[in-house]
Amino acid sequence: MSHTTMNLNLKVWRQKNASTPGAFEMYRVENISDEMSFLEMMDILNEQLITTGGSPVAFDHDCREGICGMCSMYINGKPHGPWQANTTCQLHMRAFSNNDTIVIEPWRANAFPVIKDLTVDRSAFDRIIQAGGYVSVNTGNAVDGNTLPIEKAKADEAFAAAMCIGCGACVAACKNSSAMLFLSAKVSHLALLPQGGPERKTRVTNMVAQLDKEGFGACTNTGACEAACPKEISIANIARLNKEYIVAGLTSE
């Protein structure tokens, strides 16, 4: 199978920090293989910048296998780029054509302040998860995996919700910068399982309170979050979150 190479124009957002105004800068990269990942292309850009005495573009990355959720980039107006159900690190350059101009931006949300260039501070997600507390499970002795019977449909739904990698694409895609899809996935996967029962009410109320404190916007059900999610988390989880929150409010002592 033959491989093609391409030359590209990159319009990249550069910003020193959250308090300094940023701006787009244009770069040219050449002989980019269509088999490269998007992040490998960014590595080549940074090698060029370092070689010529410039400052490399800061961007988040870790596993480069679509697992960790670190590779948060807004590419040509879409979180994680043009491919559906895909992370930036799994986006390959065959998605683009020779002499394309690619616009690359950070997540845009007040709750995700820019650290530098394309890197944003997503610790708000960590604080929301921490607000959920813990799960009461007896860890004193090893037990068989099937000691707690769980309906297959619920187990499947819980697993699907737990697929959320916390990348923040839902926030970036939402016109309100809402994090409801992320929060609903974190609440749902425990609410669906018996292990999550003891802290069910306090978990949802505390996590919603932290969500509001972080400054994320409200959900208006446009579905942009689900469309942009690399793990295809369903907005049905948002309905479950709302139900969990209402029930917790009505039945709490």
Image (cartoon, helix red, strand yellow):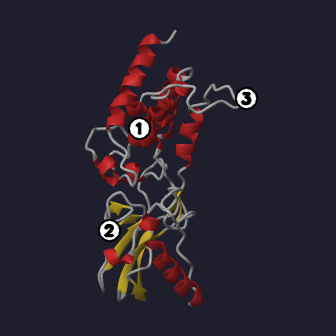
User: Considering the numbered disc 2 on the image, is that residue within a helix, a strand or a loop?
Assistant: loop
Residue 195 higher or lower than 214, as above or below:
above
Q: Nearer the viewer, mark 3 or mark 2?
A: 3
What amino acid type is highlighted by mark number 2?
A: Asn
- As measured in the structure, the alpha-carbon distance from the residue carrying label 1 to the one carrying label 2 is 34 Å
Residue receiving disc 2: 76
Image position, residue 84 (x, y; %)? 32, 59
Which of the two marks, 1 or 2, is nearer to us in this view? 1
119, above or below 2, in the image: above
Residue 76: quarter of image: bottom left
Would you say residue 179 is visible in this rendering?
Answer: no
Q: Which residue is mark 1?
A: 156
State the image coordinates of residue 166 (x, y, percent, origin top left).
Answer: 49, 49
Image coords of residue 199 (percent x, y): 56, 22
Pointers 3 and 2 in contact (CB under 8 A)?
no
Residue under label 3, please give it. Answer: 141
**Foreground of the two, 119 or 191:** 191
Sequence-wise first label, 3 or 2: 2
